[in-house]
Image (spheres, rainbow, N blue to C red):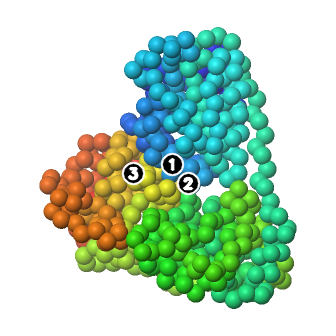
Amino acid sequence: MNGAESLVHSFLGAGVDVCFSNPGTSEMHFVAALDRVPGMRCILGLQENVVTGAADGYWRMAGKPAVTLLHCAPGLANGLANLHNAKRAKSGIVNCVGDHATYHRQYDAPLTGDTEGFARGVSGWVRTSQRAEDVGRDAMVAVQAARSSPGQIATMILPSDTCWNPGGVVAAPLPVPAVPQADPSAVRAAARVLREKSNVLLLLGGNMAISEAAQKQAQRIHAKTGVRLMAETSNSRFQRGQGRLQLERVPYPADQAIAALASVREIILVGSKAPIGFFAYPNKPSKHYPEDAGITVLTRPEQDAESALRALADELGCPAAVAMPDPGPKPSVERGPPTPEGLARTVAALMPEDAIIVDEAVSYGRGFFPHTYAAAPHEWLQITGGAIGCGLPLATGAAVGGGGRRVINLQADGSAMYTVQALWTQAREKLPITTIILSNRKYQILLGEYQGVGANPGRTALDMMDLGNPDIGWASLAKSLGVEAATATTLEQVGDLLAQSLTQSGPFLIELVI
């Protein structure tokens, strides 16, 4: 058995059975091993940022890591933006990065690079295997690291001779570390704040704090104390819709966030960070909450937020069960010219139960949440690290990990062009994804940022934010990559096309001209 074969056998034994790949010469023995050892689903991405973004989406839905197969330092570098997003989402991913043979690195061949250096910026664990005998064992440490709460990126670098040399040893899976529990003193401290202070905000962040189970505990606390409940601005996986909390998020724009938090005097953090600005702006504070507000940490991101909220509710003597607030009637399909509110209500009206929404709508989608509270129960995945180009790959991985559930990707057109190759993978794998391209033909968010920093754009600056001249033909582009597509200019048209797409088993793209 060579090192590559021991690697695949070890992964499969640990339950890692999906590989998103874009291989090169250094990875050919890994590729050959995938051919010889059955059991691994191998999914090709045509650019590494598609591969890494798909692995992020897969973790968010499947709750277990996929493995990526990347080619040397430049291949890893191509995937770094969506690994950055995955790191911010606290997603567990195992990267396998091929490299030059150990004896070849001394010659500084053209593809030689600082692979470990590139990996460290996005990884919680990095290791270069040195011998075929080490590969299986290293892989199991990588899987254990990726699955450690709340999830992290583990990158193992495989010189090609460690894969082709004999001596590979299949390694047994390592135990997954238990999820850390909150300190009882933190529960008592949070209870004391809720008993003694006013204008308290309970800020929920991370998968564990905004899960449906955690929401029920937060609602118990709200019903007893009247504490204000909010979620962070960006969330990796948000269970929403009927029967769940109607959670307001901290707004993205600085002025709106500062106004929304102006009355807050105490913040209890549940898997979250105290709200700060996404960027700095002239003459505006970096902290979006009042300087004199007290901060109490109930749980850190890696701790069990649901059990901590339950303990806090019990400490406060909250009722054992409290009904969720009624979100009102389910929205109807809207008519007329596209608006953000109309699109949100149309999607809410038509989305099937247990749909997965992938949101990279950017500026157009900031107000979607209030108009989708009454939708059928669904999950909402957001861009978490601000590196645009995550939506199409994230939807791809979410569909693979979602067990056949329909994915609806609300996608800004400028961001989509970063990783448009993901459409090809969706077509090849026949994935149940509906993409709605919000085609305003400009980087709308940058126009808002220009105002935020107090700059005055002229013709040259405006041209750099314009995606017209020529316009991108999204329907034609999608069809060229194997995805059925159509264009809509009204909300009733997008509603008809969305309903049509939900009856199909494969991908469909709607260009909504706005």
Which quadrant of the rendered structure holds the C terminus?
Answer: bottom left
**x then y, percent, for residue 335:** 29, 78
Q: How many discs appear? A: 3
User: What kind of element bears circle 3?
Assistant: loop
* Amino acid of disc 1: His
Q: Is residue 27 left or right of residue 187?
A: left
| Front disc: 3 or 1 | 1
Q: Give me the disc on residue 257.
A: none
Q: Residues within 10 Å of mark 3 (few under 14, many from 20)?
A: many
Residue 226 at x, y = what percent?
68, 88
Label 3 sits on residue: 389
Is residue 16 something one can see in this rendering? no
Q: What residue type is labelled 3?
A: Gly
Q: Quadrant of the rendered structure where residue 180 is?
A: bottom right
Residue 121 falls in image quadrant = top right
In this image, 469 relative to 55: left or right?
A: left
- Packing grade of label 1 (10 A; few <14, some 14-19, many >=20) is many
Q: Please tell me how crowded label 2 is: few (under 14), some (14-19), or many (20+) other residues with Cα within 10 Å.
A: some
- Numbered disc 2: secondary structure: helix
Residue, disc 1: 84
The location of residue 54, given as percent across then percent down, is 49, 45
Q: Nearer the viewer, mark 3 or mark 2?
A: 2
Question: Tag 1, which secondary structure?
Answer: helix
Marks 2/1 in contact by CB < 8 Å: the verdict is yes
Q: How far apart are marks 2 and 1 (CA)?
A: 6 Å
Callouts 3 and 1 close, C-beta under 8 Å: no
Give the quadrant of the N terminus: top right
144 or 510, nearer to the observer: 144
Residue at the disc numbered 2: 88
Q: Give residue 177's position: percent from left, percent from top.
A: 78, 46
Q: What residue type is labelled 2?
A: Arg
